[in-house]
Amino acid sequence: MGITGRRDQEILDVVGIGFGPSNMSLAIALKEHGASAPLHPVRSHFFERQPTFGWHRNMLLPSATMQISFLKDLATFRNPVSRFSFVSFLHASNRLVQFVNNQSFIPTRQEFHQYLEWAAAGLSDQVTYGSEVTAIRPVTGPGARTPDLLEIEVRSGDGSARVVTARNVVVSTGLVPRLPEGVTAGERVWHSSEFLTRFNAQDPASLKSVAVVGAGQSAAEVTRFFHDSLPHAQVTAVIPSYGYSVADDTPFANQVFDPDTVDEYYFGTEGARDAFWRYHRNTNYSVVDADVIRALYQRQYDEQVSGVQRLHFRNLTRVDSVEGSDSGARVVLRSLLDDRREELAFDALVFASGYDGLDPARLLGEEFDRHFQRDAAGRHRVERDYRLVATSGLSCGVYLQGGTEHSHGLTSALLSNIAIRSGEIADSIVLRRTERELGRQAEETPSAA
C-alpha cells in the first residue's frame, strides 16, 4: 500500500477531490437526488485541502464584479427551485428586494463569494477540509474480478493518512497559477492569485513604484486597485498587446457558453472546434470588461489634463528577465515595437499571467494513468459525461471538472455551465450504479430450466 494510515470500510459511490464551486455544485446535485430517492441516496464525500472554504480570495478586490449573471449559480440552470440558488441566498440574507432594486444581473465578486460560503455551510456534512488527496489507484488483488473500486489516499494537515474506497472519483482541483519561464515568486514578485495576501502584508508607504504584467481581467483590476489604493505611487501596466482588448459579452457571442453548445463542440468536427476558439476566445481569454477599460483610460486621461501622471501603460512590451529581492524587483522590459530593452526597478511586481489547467495524471500516477486513453496530441480522451475513457476493463469512473477544454469547449473551466455539468455527472453516476446493480441481479438470478 505504501501508507500506514487506517482504511475506511465504507464503499462510497463517489469521492470528490476538491471543494470549489464545481464540486460544490455536484454535491448539491447529489443531495437533491437523495431528496427525491431517500431510500437509495448516492453515498458521497468530498475532500478539500484548504482549511476552510475559499474561492479566489486574493482577487476579492473592492468593486470587482462577476462576469456572469447571478442566475449562472451552483444550481439554477439545473433546478430553478433549488434551495441552493443565489436567489435563495439573497432571501436568506434579507437582501432580495435590495438586490432587485439595484437593477443589475451582475453581483460583485465579494457578494458572490458570500453566496458560495453560505452554500458551503449548508453542505458542511459532505466535506472534510484540511485534507489533501495524494493518490488514486484501482483496488487489485485476490478476489478483485475487475477493477471496479478505487482507493483514494487522503492526508490530513497533521500528517495522518487514511484510505477511502469508492466506485467513482470526481477530480476538481482547480487551476494552477502560472508564472513566465524563469520567474520565481518572492517577497516582492507575486502572482495575482496571491495578490491581496501579499499586498496586505506590505507597508503601503514602501510601495512607491509598482507594476502589473498581463492583458486580461485580473491584470486590469490589479492595476486599477494599485492606482486607487496607492495615491502616492507610480503604477505601470506592462501589456503584451496594444492596450487591453474588450471582452465580448454580447448575446450571440454568449451563446458559446450555453449548455447545448457543449454537444455541438463535443460532437463537432475538428474544423468546428477550431472555429469556436478562433472566433470566440475573446469572450473570456486575455480580455477585459469594457467598464474596467474605460475606468483606466479615464484615469490616464485625467492625469494628462492635470499634468501629473503616475499611471503608465507599456503597450506591446514583454518581460525579458526579473531579479527579485526582499525590497523590490529589477525588471528588464523589451519593446515589441523596436526591440529596445530597458531595465527598471519596482517595489512590487505582479504577474497576472494566467493558470495551467487541471491534469489528472498527477493524482493517477504513471501506472494507473496508462489505463486511460489519450488523443494524438497527448491529451486525455473524455466521454461526453466528463469521464475519462479507459483502455481496459475498468468499471470504476474517473470524472473531470476542468481540464476538458479540448473535448467539451470553452465552458470547461468556467462557472457558466457549472450547474448543468454537475447535473450530468451526477446523472451518469446514478445511471451507471443502476446498470451495475441490475447486472448483478441478473447474475444472481438462476435462469429458467
Image (cartoon, helix red, strand yellow):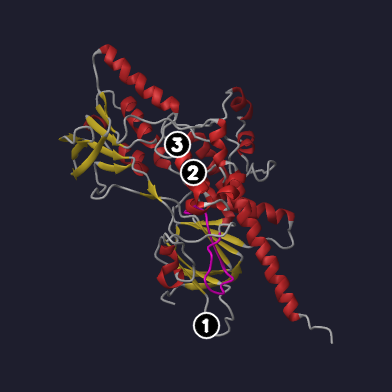
- Return the mark for residue 265: none
Q: CA distance from mark 1 to mark 3?
A: 51 Å
Q: CA distance from mark 3 to mark 2?
A: 12 Å
The structure residue drawn at horizontal position 44% and vertical position 25%, both measured from the top left corner, is 291
424 vs 160, nearest the viewer:
424
Query: In this view, which residue lies farthest toward the top?
Result: 305
In this rendering, position of residue 358 left or right of residue 387 = left
Judged by its main secondary structure, the magenta piece is loop
Residue 220 x/y as whole percent: 36, 32
Mark 2 — residue? 275
The answer to whether residue 123 is magenta is no
The answer to whether residue 399 is magenta is yes
Mark 1 — residue? 141
| Mark whose residue sits in front, 3 or 2 | 2
Mark 1: which amino acid? Gly
Quarter of the figure with residue 278: top left
Q: CA distance from mark 1 to mark 2?
A: 48 Å
Q: Secondary structure at mark 2?
A: helix
- Determine whether label 1 and label 3 are within 8 Å by CB: no
Q: Which residues are magenta?
A: 387-404
> Can residue 201 be seen in the rendering of this structure?
no
Mark 2: which amino acid? Ala
- Return the mark for residue 282: 3
Q: Quadrant of the C terminus?
A: bottom right
